[in-house]
Image (cartoon, helix red, strand yellow):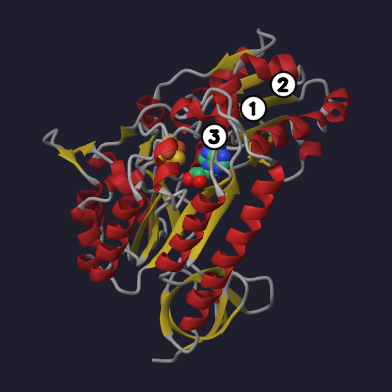
Amino acid sequence: MLEKNKKIFLKTYGCQMNVYDSDIMLDQLKKKGYEATSSDAEADLIVLNTCHIREKAAEKVYSELGKYRSLKKKNPSLKIGVAGCVAQAEGNEIIKRQPLVDFVVGPQSYHSISTILERLDDEEKVVNIEFATQEKFSKLKVNGGEKIKPSQFLTVQEGCDKFCAFCVVPYTRGVEVSRSVNEILDDAKNLVKYGAVEITLLGQNVNAYCGLDNNLKERDLSYLINKMSEIANLKRIRFVTSHPADMTEDLIQTFGSNPKLMPYLHLPIQSGSDAILKKMNRRHKVSDYMEVISKLRDVRSDIALSGDFIVGFPEETDEDFKKTIEICHLVRYASAFSFKYSPRPGTPAFERKDLPDSTKTERLSALQAVIKDYQQKFQKNLVGEKLPILAEKSGRAEGQIVGKSPYLQPVFFSGSMELIGKIIDVQIIASEANSLSGVVQQN
Ligand code: 5AD
Ligand code: SF4
């Protein structure tokens, strides 16, 4: 049944994969007649697409849900759903803890969200946290025909088989599943047809991509990137997130040989200490990581490197932590994310003794200061350069455009809105905390 004029408020937490998944849910619900709203007060349906990676992220969901009590009192027909990784990890427990919730849907079941809503006509609560990734993908058809933004995400792989000792992803997103080469190429062509100029390939472990081609031959990420780059109007390709152990020689070489692959790589190391990497079950040593970095720089000397770090993992000593700082000096990251270790129930590290929060806080701020410093250095180095910038959208100020550099920094400049969707030469004139500014160069 078509739900005319019904409104959905969808709030997304966590990673890019969730942002992408939220779009899938919206697509499904639009087909049912729902319209998105940015106001929870006027919604007929509220969905929180949640993140379970750290305790804080998961707790936010419960405090947010509590706020909806008064809305539900005013409008008893309001439906509230929890999606994403908290849904997958906690299932029924969510409804027990917060009875306001009407349904729980895991990341592999978004294709069935319309059916879930129909079931709520007869059933009081619905929980669907089955794993059926292929089915979700096959229901995923990009775009209804309207023009889309120049930079788009495209999921090519989901799940992770690495089982790092601290991480919930293998449990919430399941084992690695890759989409077929053709399915991805079809989606990519479709995105480009409606205006995409840049596509970022998404996967929890994207460089472990292993999809079938038409002859049922397994193909890796470098093959996929090279195939995608044959799409004439697709100008830029990126991928995120990668594991050091899956950085194959072919993939490294692609940074040098394929000009459409942008010079940016997010390659988490998590710790600079081999002892901690081992305890984290990371399956690589610091020297393996540094070897990859050095090979990447051989083929693409300007590559911007990014990473993730966890500080205060159980048994991390001051010596171990010093080695993490050393890695930052060696790699000279263009940007990096860092987090205090958060014990997650169900992961092997959960059983180990947690370090005092004060130690974690101290280490985190020391690490972030070093990271920030290198980020500033990287950006300042770009001042004075002429860079090809993808104009993405209008900025807040009149006549301002926000674009993206090859190295992923936002770039602000003035220009005609007709430039949006084009790659233009911009002279970089200044570096701010997290962005650059520049002036368009006339050819
Ligand atoms: N505690 C802190 N950070 C974590 N991450 C994953 N699990 C945890 C955890 N339990 C971080 C890792 C990962 C990023 C997405 O989140 O650095 O790369
Ligand atoms: Fe989690 Fe990444 Fe390790 Fe997989 S490789 S378990 S997603 S941290």
For marks 1 and 2, the one nearer the N-term is 1
Q: Position of residue 105 (x, y in %)?
A: 57, 23
Q: Where on the picture, by quarter, is residue 198?
A: bottom left
Q: Which residue is mark 3?
A: 25
The residue drawn where x is 41% and y is 59% is 196
As drawn, the residue found furthest toward the left would be 215
For marks 3 and 2, the one nearer the N-term is 3
Of circles 3 and 2, the one toward us is: 2
- Asked if marks 1 and 2 touch (Cβ < 8 Å), the reply is yes
Q: CA distance from mark 3 to mark 1?
A: 12 Å
Give amino acid for label 2.
Val
Give amino acid for label 3.
Met
Alpha-carbon neighbours of circle 2 within 10 Å: few (<14), some, or many (≥20)? many
Q: Callout 2: helix, strand or loop?
A: loop
Of circles 3 and 1, the one toward us is: 1
Q: Which mark is residue 82?
A: 1
Q: Is 98 on the left-hand or right-hand side of 171? A: right
Q: Position of residue 78 (x, y in %)?
A: 76, 25
Q: Where on the picture, by quarter, is residue 132?
A: top left
The residue drawn where x is 46% and y is 81% is 382
Q: Callout 1: helix, strand or loop?
A: strand
Asked whether 156 or 290 is in front, the reply is 290
Q: CA distance from mark 3 to mark 2?
A: 18 Å
Q: Which residue is mark 2?
A: 101
For marks 3 and 1, the one nearer the N-term is 3
Up the image or down, 408 lies above or below 169; here it is below
